[in-house]
Image (cartoon, grey):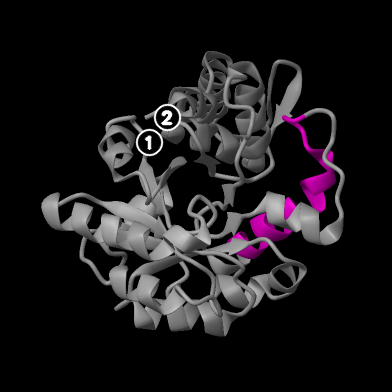
């Protein structure tokens, strides 16, 4: 049976990063409307500040009981990894993001060392993608996360001029979507949209992610939360289409029917039911 924490991670559509070195921003992030706040001990913190950042987060947790946070820890093999895992044993840490996840063993080890904290492996290397099915079924794996920026560096990928579509990443995103389905995991989490002030671009990016089988986004600024939430909610046109399909199907009583000139069959009805459920 899912724990409450794992269920929260599964349902989340927005994961907002905040640097552990800036603990004063955690409360603001929690009030932003993001589904999950991820305090970052990895990329957002310079090596010289890692230990201090961890201490800042530990102090914040001690003074704010009941806060539900996720933590992006430093990768296995780094000098800070083990201490980060110890911190993730805190009861208010509901999940840990594991960067450079490359094996099921690394996920299982993080899950065990953190006292069974849910793990969100970040797939951002060729080795990680090669082991994506094993990682998805590893003990403790709650949801897969796509780390596109590091993957682009390793594979020498040149980003598209269209920041929202990012066609160059489609094969790798498909690997996460398929592995998640095979393992029975929630839809995976897509990588960050780095143009903070481009809300229109973010909306297209989030819709593209949703249409390509992703259920959430990593965010880097509170201003991105409302746009992401709106993009993941069914539009008025989608809701109207779904109701038309379900009404027509019900009236047909199992017989053949068309809506807007298109045949309605079982997969179409299933999609309409999914849209209705997402609309609440």
Secondary element at image label 2: helix
Give the quadrant of the C terminus: top left
Which corner quadrant holds the N terminus?
Answer: bottom left
Q: Position of residue 98 (x, y in %)?
A: 51, 66
Q: 7 or 199, which lies in front?
A: 199
User: What range is drawn magenta here?
Assistant: 163-181
Give SS at disc 1: loop
Q: Nearer the viewer, residue 30 or 57?
A: 57
- The disc, 2 or 1, on the residue closer to the chain's N-terminal end is 1
Relative vertical location of residue 224 with respect to residue 124 in this rendering, above or below:
above
Asked if residue 15 lies in the magenta stretch, the reply is no
Residue at the spot x=69%, y=75% of the render? 131
Q: Of the numbered discs in the image, which one, if any, rests on residue 34?
A: 1
Residue 168 lies in the magenta-colored region: yes
- The image shows residue 26, relative to residue 173, as above or below, that is above
Q: From the viewer's perspective, is 155 left or right of 259?
A: right
Give the quarter of the image for residue 86.
bottom left
Residue that mark 2 sits on? 222
Disc 2 vs disc 1: Cβ atoms closer than 8 Å?
Answer: yes
The main secondary structure of the magenta stretch is: helix
Q: Residue at x 60, y 45 (%)?
A: 214
Tell me if mark 1 has few (under 14), some (14-19) or many (20+) residues whose alpha carbon lies within 10 angstroms of its own: many
């Amino acid at each position: 049976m899912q724990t409450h924490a794992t269920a929260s991670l599964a349902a989340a559509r927005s994961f907002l990063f905040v640097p552990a070195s800036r603990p004063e921003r955690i409360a603001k992030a929690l009030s932003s409307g993001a589904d999950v706040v991820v305090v970052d001990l990895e990329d957002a913190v310079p090596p010289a500040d890692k230990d201090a950042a961890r201490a800042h987060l530990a102090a914040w947790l001690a003074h704010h009981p009941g806060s539900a946070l996720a933590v992006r820890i430093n990768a296995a093999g780094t000098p800070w990894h083990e201490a980060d895992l110890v911190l993730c044993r805190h009861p208010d840490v509901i999940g840990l993001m594991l960067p450079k996840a490359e094996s099921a063993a690394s996920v299982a080890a993080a899950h065990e060392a953190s006292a069974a904290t849910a793990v969100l492996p970040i797939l951002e290397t060729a080795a990680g993608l090669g082991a994506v099915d094993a990682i998805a079924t590893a003990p403790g794996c709650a949801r897969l996360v796509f780390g596109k920026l590091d993957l682009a560096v390793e594979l020498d990928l040149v980003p598209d001029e269209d920041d929202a579509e990012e066609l160059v990443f489609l094969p790798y995103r498909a690997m996460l979507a398929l592995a998640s389905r095979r393992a029975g995991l929630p839809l995976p989490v897509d990588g960050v949209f780095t143009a903070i002030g481009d809300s229109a671009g973010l909306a297209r990016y989030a819709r593209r992610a949703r249409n390509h089988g992703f259920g959430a986004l990593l965010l880097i600024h509170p201003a991105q939360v409302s746009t992401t939430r709106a993009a993941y909610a069914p539009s008025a046109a989608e809701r109207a289409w779904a109701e038309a399909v379900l009404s027509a199907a019900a009236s047909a009583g199992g017989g053949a029917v068309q809506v807007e000139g298109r045949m309605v069959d079982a997969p179409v009805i299933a999609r309409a039911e999914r849209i209705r459920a997402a609309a609440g």
